[in-house]
Image (cartoon, helix red, strand yellow):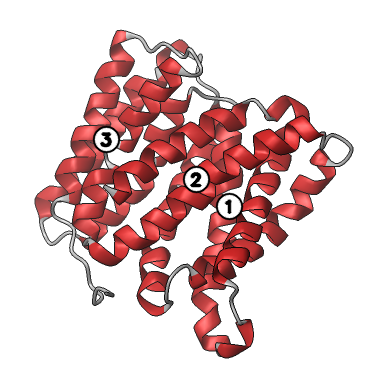
């Protein structure tokens, strides 16, 4: 349930963020969302940073850099591609993680199926898909795979949302260098209110729920649920953004979802679950 709510929140937050691109730019939107989220996590957790050693802080700090990269590249991707297509390409990252952790040689077939689905989604033979957008989605996918692995590691070692209260301020600082110049001079009350709503939907709600979900689920179970995210993104893209897919794109989305569910079922968690 936690993972399912997180997925809907992520995609709805992404759809709302699209409306901010014209006002504060892609990087400005990412910076505002992450900064508001970071403030929220710090107020909730009130972390005492001096309690942890440098070695303990390495993982959440690394998570901050990965979160910044994932957010920036994903927002850049959905500014150039339909939401469902961008998320389907991005999902290749978690799918690769599932395949690597699988003990079955047959699992190698699932990335091939997902790749075929992405080809149907992007329709390269028509030359309509943005190559730059695809590149950003691929980068976001790599970051998403790293995010899942590192978040599980952080969740096992930090109580509550302490890990996020460390990682999000780092992500805010990283995105500030590219986001603040875009947003400066355009941060009206309306923009800030929309950014607040987007930040609550992503990252505040979903990253908290995913952290708790990863404490209670194996990578296989969590990944199986995440395989539904491209389909959720497609549905929200249709309803909120009026991005209507064609027949081949629907088939491609089905391939990605099927490949994700099949591959993630063979995944294995290699660390002990937290309580």
Is label 2 or label 3 in front?
2
185 versus 224 height, above or below: above
Do callouts 2 and 1 mark residues in contact (Cβ within 8 Å)?
yes
Looking at this view, is 24 or 136 the one in front?
A: 24
Corner quadrant of residue 84? top left
Whether residue 209 is visible: yes
* Nearest to N terminus: mark 2 or mark 3: 3
* Nearest to N terminus: mark 2 or mark 1: 1
- x, y percentage for residue 237? 44, 21
Whether residue 124 is visible: no
Is label 1 or label 3 in front?
1
Q: Which mark is residue 271?
A: none
Q: Which mark is residue 114?
A: 3
- x, y percentage for residue 60? 52, 71
Q: Is residue 160 left or right of residue 120?
A: right
97 versus 225 height, above or below: below
State the residue at coordinates (69%, 48%): 31
Position of the C terminus, as image quadrant, is: bottom left
């Amino acid at each position: 349930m936690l993972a399912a709510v997180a997925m809907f929140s992520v995609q709805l937050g992404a759809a709302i963020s699209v409306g901010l691109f014209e006002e504060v730019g892609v990087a400005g939107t990412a910076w505002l969302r992450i900064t508001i989220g970071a403030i929220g996590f710090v107020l909730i957790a009130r972390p005492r940073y001096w309690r942890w050693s440098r070695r303990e802080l390495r993982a959440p700090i690394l998570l901050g850099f990965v979160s910044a990269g994932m957010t920036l590249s994903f927002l850049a991707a959905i500014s150039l591609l339909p939401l469902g297509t961008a998320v389907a390409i991005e999902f290749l990252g978690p799918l690769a993680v599932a395949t690597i952790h699988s003990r079955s040689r047959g699992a190698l077939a699932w990335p091939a199926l997902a790749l075929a689905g992405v080809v149907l989604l992007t329709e390269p033979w028509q030359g309509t898909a943005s190559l730059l957008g695809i590149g950003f989605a691929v980068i976001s996918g790599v970051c998403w795979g790293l995010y899942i692995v590192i978040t599980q590691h952080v969740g096992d070692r930090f109580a509550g949302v302490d890990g996020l209260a460390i990682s999000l301020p780092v992500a805010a600082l990283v995105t500030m260098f590219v986001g603040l110049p875009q947003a400066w001079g355009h941060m009206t009350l309306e923009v800030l209110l929309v950014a607040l709503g987007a930040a609550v939907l992503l990252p505040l709600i979903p990253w908290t729920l995913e952290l708790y979900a990863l404490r209670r689920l194996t990578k296989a179970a969590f990944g199986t649920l995440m395989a539904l995210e491209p389909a959720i993104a497609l549905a929200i893209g249709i309803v909120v953004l009026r991005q209507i897919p064609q027949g081949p794109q629907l088939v491609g989305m089905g391939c990605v979802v099927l490949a994700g569910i099949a591959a993630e079922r063979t995944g294995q968690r290699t660390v002990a679950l937290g309580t």
